[in-house]
């Protein structure tokens, strides 16, 4: 089919689509809902690795957002059906049963499903926080301990972090990169997956503004850095399901990246065939819009206002008996460390009595998504959490 698209100038009878009058056959009742978009853009299959123009546009955005990548070779992004699909593809490509997966104890549950349940990896957790910041020493110790006797280690990091809403400081980011490079220097082959789902939602000065990918790309031949990101949160298009995978390793050539992208394309082809062409077209047109940067920055400011309001509300000493808030400075979420009461018990009581939904991460930790709250609703939410806690504390 790929060859026919290029060479079949007379007739292309390879693809299972229906054409009419030189364009995709379509129902008018459907296309009327998509003014300004052609049937071909909306309805035909996209290539398994994604629309070439979108892949180039996302690469350009990645370099623009991460000036440290200027001049650093990395693969042309491959399009996935959202970031979750991207993680599953990476698990299929890089993880074998029994491989060790180093990740923080504050992590997204889909990591466990994709890498541990589906692929049989051994989860090796380290504490995320120490003294109000990222536990760099615990991370470095985990790399040392969990790579002992092994020639391969998979590492998974996510900043801004889900569930904590924390991004390391610039100094912490440098220390994280140094620990990974030191591990590679010891002869360990590293696959470092960087989940940048919430990239760009930074609310404080002094935190790492560029992706960790920019600190690792091309730095060592034993360190494969993988950037998994998505339009999902960056462009505020959750249901369009458009994600991306980019890769970089030191001392390689473009030929390797082409081969890896072919493997990614084959994995995508084998499971979902391709991501939605319509979704890709919409994201591409948004990226090309002259107003994209200004509109995106305005939405980040809305999210920042919500985060700062949460921080302001949590200064109330009345909450101290019920919980301690973990540090947060970015992303969609923050977490409370609940005193005395089991977090799952609190979650259920809060939902059933007060109609407030939250997520219990562990027996002690409750996640709050301030992303979906208006500023005016934030005080009331935390007051209701306190009320529910007091009900149970009695």
Image (spheres, helix red, strand yellow):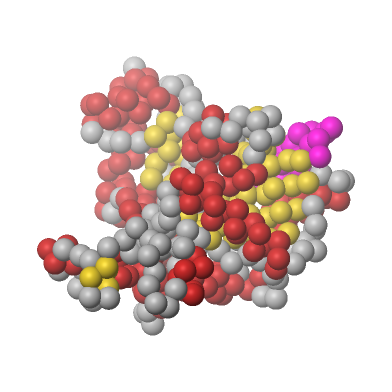
Q: Quadrant of residue 314?
A: top left
The magenta segment is 134-151
Q: Is residue 321 above or below residue 31?
A: above
Q: Is residue 233 above or below residue 123?
A: below
For image coordinates 39% across by 41% down, the residue present is 368
Residue 203 visible to the viewer:
no
Q: Is residue 141 magenta?
A: yes
Residue at the left extreme, as displayed: 29
Q: Is residue 166 above or below residue 16?
A: above
Q: Is residue 386 magenta?
A: no
Residue 299: x percent and y percent? 37, 66
For image coordinates 30% across by 70% down, the residue present is 40
Instruction: Judge by depth and name the residue closer to the eye, 151 or 128.
Output: 151
Per the picture, the main secondary structure of the magenta-coloured stretch is helix
Residue 239: x percent and y percent? 33, 53
Left or right: where does residue 256 sit relative to residue 307?
Answer: right
Query: On the rendered image, what quadrant is the C terminus found in?
Result: top left
For image coordinates 40% across by 25% down, the residue present is 344
Instruction: Judge by depth and name the residue closer to the eye, 257 or 173.
Output: 257
Left or right: where does residue 210 sit relative to residue 346?
Answer: right
């Amino acid at each position: 089919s790929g060859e026919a698209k290029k060479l079949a100038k007379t007739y292309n009878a390879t693809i299972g689509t229906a054409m009419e009058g030189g364009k995709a056959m379509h129902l008018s009742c459907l296309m009327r809902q998509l003014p300004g978009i052609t049937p071909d853009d909306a309805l035909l299959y996209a290539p398994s690795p994604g629309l070439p123009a979108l892949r180039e546009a996302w690469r350009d955005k990645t370099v623009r957002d991460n000036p440290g990548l200027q001049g650093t070779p990395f693969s042309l992004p491959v399009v996935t059906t959202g970031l979750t699909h991207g993680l599953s593809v990476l698990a299929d490509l890089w993880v074998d049963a029994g491989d060790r997966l180093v990740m923080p104890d504050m992590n997204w549950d889909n990591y466990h499903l994709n890498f541990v349940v589906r692929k049989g990896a051994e989860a090796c957790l380290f504490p995320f926080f120490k003294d109000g910041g990222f536990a760099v020493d615990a991370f470095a110790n985990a790399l040392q301990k969990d790579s002992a006797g092994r020639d391969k280690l998979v590492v998974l990091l996510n900043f801004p972090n889900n569930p904590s809403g924390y991004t390391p400081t610039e100094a912490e980011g440098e220390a994280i990169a140094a620990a990974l490079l030191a591990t590679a220097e010891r002869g360990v082959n590293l696959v470092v997956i960087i989940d940048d789902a919430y990239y760009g939602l930074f609310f404080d000065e002094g935190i790492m503004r560029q992706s960790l990918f920019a600190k690792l790309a091309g730095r060592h031949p034993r360190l494969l850095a993988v950037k998994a990101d998505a339009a999902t949160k960056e462009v505020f298009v959750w249901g369009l399901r458009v994600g991306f995978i980019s890769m970089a390793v030191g001392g390689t050539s473009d030929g390797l990246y082409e081969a890896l992208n072919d493997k990614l394309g084959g994995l995508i082809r084998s499971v979902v065939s391709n991501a939605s062409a319509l979704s890709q077209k919409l994201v591409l047109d948004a990226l090309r819009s002259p107003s994209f940067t200004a509109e995106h920055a305005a939405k980040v400011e809305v999210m920042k206002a919500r985060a700062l309001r949460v921080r302001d509300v949590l200064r109330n000493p009345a909450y101290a008996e019920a919980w301690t808030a973990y540090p947060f400075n970015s992303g969609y979420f923050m977490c409370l460390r609940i005193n005395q009461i089991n977090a799952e018990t609190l979650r259920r009581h809060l939902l059933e009595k007060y109609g407030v939904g939250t997520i219990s991460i562990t027996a002690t930790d409750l996640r709050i998504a301030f992303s979906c709250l208006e500023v005016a609703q934030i005080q009331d939410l935390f007051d209701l959490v306190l009320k529910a806690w007091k009900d149970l504390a009695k």
